Image (tube, helix red, strand yellow):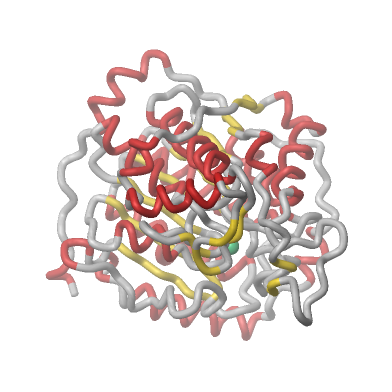
């Protein structure tokens, strides 16, 4: 195993650091755009079932990819004391040049044509309405500019409330509500524009980040780590044996967890796999695919994380960013469908990023803490995580 490990190439980051450090801004940015919340999923999906035949249309905000779970993050931040410490901002759309670093031109052309024609579906569980091509470019733009802002020190760290999400989207096919690969577009732009040597991506969305994985699978300059519920979505992706290809072998790490895993399992993965892998890799930039659907009430998964889990993971990513890349950390929103719970998870992340406590009281926390797996189940899950850590070439 150890023969597979390679020493990463010398970093080019210092050039960037020296040119922008003098104008550094340490504030935390929250990138959002109202238009992203107007992306329509054409009413086709109620939770995970297509509407029609034996499935009745949902009442109210019953759509799986309803904008409400995202909008309510912004709303909660704005009515809380966090509004005083965050910089709310927006960003332009990603350009065609930005998208073509990741996506096939034929896919972009087909997507735009269908969007202009009123919408439809261009992949598995990826419905959209009129104008969604431009909205998806805006979503990718939020990710791209949040990443760019932390690389150039316009902000200390940042969160992009992207919608539609991106981590399932392949180079030439939409999948699972994801129409453009937002994080991949943002990372490729950062590499192209700022000459970064290495970027690490942690995907803690409860579903596997198959799209991002596929785009960087043969690369040794982008480390991709996905923590997800085993076998949840998409089908036939995300096994721990998928470790990269060619020179990328070892730089793709999948950590599938059993349904019902909670706070302890997530933090143990951070300790046993994420932290040592990033310490080995020594990235110039850290990006998180921040799905908030591992919480204990999500309708599209069965995990037991809570706001405190997301806050702790964010703090650990901040510590890694401080250790390796001058604090450069950007989080890009992915999934999260429990409208009442997602905002508390998002706010906890923003508390961590801003280094501020807030006046928000999370009424779900006590219930989720009571639901955590017992000691015997935690020990079993830790054993599985130890096995996965031992099988990773980058950690050998
Ligand atoms: Zn998800």
x, y percentage for residue 382? 51, 77
Task: Please tell me whether residue 55 is drawn above or below residue 363 in the rendered image.
Answer: below
Q: Which residue is depicted at the point 51% across and 24% down?
A: 26
Q: Is residue 329 above or below residue 371?
A: above
**Rendering coords of residue 297 (x, y %):** 75, 66
Left or right of 4, for residue 130: right
The residue lying toward the viewer, choosing from 36 and 309, is: 36
Residue under the image location 78 percent in, 58 percent down: 365
Between residue 136 and residue 108, name the one nearer to us.
108
- Is any part of residue 20 visible from this angle? yes
* 283 shown above or below 242: above
Q: Is residue 229 left or right of residue 300?
A: left
**Residue 289 visible to the viewer:** no
Coordinates of residue 329 in the picture (x, y in percent): 45, 39
Front residue of this view, candidates 68 and 108: 108
Point out the residue furthest to the front here: 117
């Amino acid at each position: 195993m150890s023969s597979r490990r390679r020493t990463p190439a010398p970093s080019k980051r210092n050039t960037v650091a020296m040119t922008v450090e003098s104008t550094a801004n340490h504030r935390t940015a929250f990138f959002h755009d109202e238009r992203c919340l107007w992306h329509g999923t054409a009413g086709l999906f109620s939770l995970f079932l297509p509407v029609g035949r034996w499935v009745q249309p949902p009442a109210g905000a019953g759509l799986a990819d309803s904008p409400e779970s995202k909008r309510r993050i912004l709303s909660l931040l704005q009515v809380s004391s966090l509004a005083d410490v965050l910089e709310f901002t927006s960003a332009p759309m990603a350009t065609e040049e930005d998208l073509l670093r990741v996506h096939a031109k034929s896919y972009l052309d087909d997507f735009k044509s269908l969007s202009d024609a009123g919408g439809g579906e261009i992949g598995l569980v990826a419905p959209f309405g009129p104008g969604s091509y431009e909205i998806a470019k805006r979503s990718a733009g939020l990710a791209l500019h949040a990443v760019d802002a932390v690389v150039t020190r316009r902000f200390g760290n940042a969160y992009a409330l992207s919608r539609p999400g991106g981590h399932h989207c392949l180079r030439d096919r939409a999948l699972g509500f994801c129409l453009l690969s937002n994080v991949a577009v943002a990372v490729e732009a950062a590499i192209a524009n700022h000459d970064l040597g290495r970027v690490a991506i942690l995907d803690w969305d409860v579903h596997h980040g198959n799209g991002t994985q596929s785009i960087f699978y043969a690369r040794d300059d982008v480390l991709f780590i996905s923590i997800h519920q085993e076998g949840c979505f998409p089908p036939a992706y995300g096994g721990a044996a998928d470790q990269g290809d060619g020179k990328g072998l070892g730089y793709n790490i999948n950590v599938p967890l059993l349904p019902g895993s909670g706070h302890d399992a997530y933090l143990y993965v951070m300790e046993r796999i994420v932290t040592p892998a990033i310490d080995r890799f020594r990235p110039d930039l850290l990006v998180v695919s921040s799905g908030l659907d591992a919480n204990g009430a999500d309708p599209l998964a069965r995990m037991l994380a809570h706001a405190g889990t997301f806050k702790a993971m964010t703090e650990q990513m901040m510590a890694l960013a401080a250790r390796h890349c001058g604090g450069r950390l950007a989080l890009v929103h992915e999934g999260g469908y429990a409208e009442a719970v997602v905002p508390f998870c998002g706010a906890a992340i923003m508390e961590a990023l801003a280094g501020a406590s807030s006046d928000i009281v999370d009424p779900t926390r006590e219930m989720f803490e009571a639901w955590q797996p017992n000691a015997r189940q935690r020990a079993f899950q830790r054993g599985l995580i130890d096995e996965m850590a031992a099988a990773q070439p980058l950690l050998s």
